[in-house]
Image: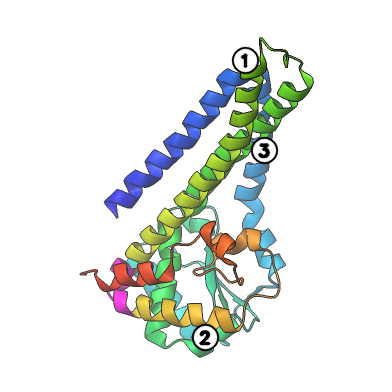
Amino acid sequence: MVWNQIKTVLLLSALTGIVLLLGGYVGGTAGLTIAFVLALGMNAISYFWSDKIVLMMYGAKEAAKKDYPQLHKIVEEVSCAAGIPKPKVYIIQSATPNAFATGRNPSNAVVAATSSILQLLSNEELKGVIGHEIGHVKNRDILICTIAATLATIISYVGQMLQFSAIFGGGRDDRNSGSFLGMIAIAILAPIMALLIQLAISRSREYIADETGAAITGKPQHLASALRKLEAGVKQHPMRMGSPATSSLFIVNPFSASALVSLLSTHPPTAERVKRLEAMKV
């Protein structure tokens, strides 16, 4: 877990470095400041209201304790073991077995589970899944991913500004052709690098949530078993609603994916996650 935490810091630092590099190429602070303010505003909205937006997107309804007593019991036990307040519990009516957590901090957290995951998993496996989601809440992954998204969005904006400046700002004569081509290359490559770093941060946080959840429940093998079942279940019944842009929220990618999409996945390979969990000693 320590290495994954260090890796997250290094990746966030790399994103910050790209922002500073692009700022130097812009040649001034005005454009960078505007991009920063816009990105900060967009991601502030996402940070404070994304939970409500995503719950609405998937038609999630708050789960009454009398209707889902076992789910509430598991969430209460795991959150108590983690030392955080019990999150609100929501249900999504879907044939895709999956779950996610959202909310900007432990006091405003939500754990959502699909109706089919309750049918597919044993109580022990479900507890492993809830442990993973509580791990996200405890580790404040929403905040970390929001910071990464803010930096990546700034890079994207500044990259577009550089392209616009290179194409319409003149300077394409023989003297400046090298500078022009360099600017275009940086404007194109920087946002791609930022996206790849952002995806790497997301994958790193998934490993950390697996480890945190397993440590909370003390049963990493149950989460490993659940992940195998969930991956097979998603292949049989991929999500038919929502948006792939929200896939990082779920414990496994709920959408069917091509090889290219898998390369750009927000989740590590399930086989590697299972391997790490089975090697854990708690």
**In front here: 64 or 102?**
102
Magenta segment includes 177: no
Query: In the image, is 170 to the left or to the right of 261?
Result: right
Q: Residue at x 66, y 9 (%)?
A: 175
Q: Name the residue under label 1.
A: 27
Q: Which of marks 1 and 2 is nearer the N terminus?
A: 1
Q: Is residue 154 above or below residue 84?
A: above
Q: What residue would you read off at disc 2?
A: 118
Callout 3 crowding tier (Cα within 10 Å): few <14, some 14–19, many ≥20: few
19 and 139: which is toward the camera: 19
Q: Mark 3 points at which residue?
A: 41
Give the farthest residue toward the front.
174
- Residue 222, above or below 252: below
Q: Which of 241 and 72 is in front in this view?
A: 241
The N terminus - image quarter = bottom left
The Cα atoms of the two marked residues, 1 and 2, are separated by 56 Å
Q: Which amino acid does label 2 sit on?
A: Leu
Q: Given the image, on which type of amino acid does mark 1 rest?
A: Gly
Q: In which quarter of the image is the C terminus?
A: bottom left
Label 2 element class: helix
- Which residue is drawn at the image coordinates 53% and 83% (left, top)? 233
Query: In whole angstroms, how far apart are the C-alphas of marks 2 and 3?
Result: 38 Å
Q: Residue reaching furthest top?
A: 175
Percent position of residue 278, x then y? 27, 74
Residue 267 seen in render: yes
**Residue at x 47% of width, y 57% of height:** 106
Magenta range: 214-221
Percent x, y for residue 18? Answer: 51, 31
Where does residue 16 sit, x and y in percent of width and height? 49, 32
Separation of residues labelled 3 and 1 (CA atoms) = 23 Å
Label 3: which secondary element: helix
**Residue type, label 3:** Gly
